[in-house]
Amino acid sequence: MDDEQLPRPEPENPRPQQRAPAFNLPPAILASLAVLIVIFAVMNLPWWSDDTLNWIYFAFSFIPARYAFPLSQQGLEWLWTPVTYSLLHGGIEHIVFNSLWLMVFAAPVARRIGALRYVIFWIFSSAASAFLHAALYWGDQTLLIGASGVVSALMGAACRFAFPAMDSRRVSMRQAHLNPRLGILQSLRSRTVVAYIVMWVAGNALVAFGINLAGDSSQPVAWDAHIGGFLFGFLLFAPFDRQPPEEVREPLPLDE
């Protein structure tokens, strides 16, 4: 009688692969999105009168004309509006596009620098975007709203550590926060960074000439605030950065 041939057991994998979730945003980004969406929803409740909405926009939007006159002759709005304007949005397309870009480009920055530094970065980049806009439109009475300047700053910051790693196609954006920060000139040697900056500048140049590729084309776009934010993030990211520990600086390979 022949012996029964039992199947050979498969060796156990000592390091089972862990599949990362497809949608895994840092808590700071989720909190940012929640704040933007809640404010937008509250602002669009049906019971607000036009006078109340006008007061809210006046009190929390950035207006360059505020800084063309002595601050002692005004209220205190000049203190907080360089930041609060970034939390307001004028329409559904405006907030949807800013939220999408925020999810893409803010995630690696937030993972890298942590929630507290992310909030501080938001405050300073918002002010930098607003005051470049004010410098170009000094004394103008139009209202500036939206998080586009902050998003542009986060894009600029990502150019210092996240995008350069994509040159070799070995690193995903989910792991890019582990890369070392490059110097300004080093970043400009990256093919990915240069290609991105060229496309970004071209897109903003079209906006400057009235050609809006995305979002609500009926509303004017403060392309200059985008540039102010990007320059802030790209040139001044180092003081906000928190370098990853030496033992984890080497990014993980892409999942098969």
Image: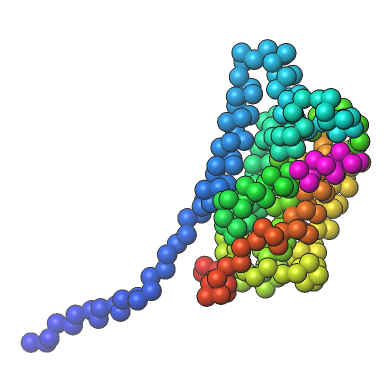
Q: Quadrant of residue 129?
A: top right
Above or below — where is 196 with respect to 251?
above
Q: Which residues are magenta?
A: 127-136
Name the residue nearer the viewer: 59 or 110: 59
Q: Position of residue 100 (x, y in %)?
A: 64, 44
Q: Residue 131: say if magenta.
A: yes
In the rendered view, does 253 fall on the left or right side of 44?
left
Q: Position of residue 70 (x, y in %)?
A: 87, 30
Residue that lies at the very extreme toward the left in this rendered image: 1
* Rendered-image quadrant of the N terminus: bottom left
Residue 1 visible in the picture: yes
Tally of numbered tags: 0
Q: Kindly indicate the quadrant of the structure image that contains residue 47.
A: top right
Instruction: Write the residue at 57% across / 55% down.
Output: 114
Q: Provide the major secondary structure of the magenta segment.
A: helix
Q: Position of residue 95 (x, y in %)?
A: 67, 35
Q: In the picture provided, is 234 more to the left or to the right than 68?
A: left
Q: Is residue 15 above or below residue 220?
A: below
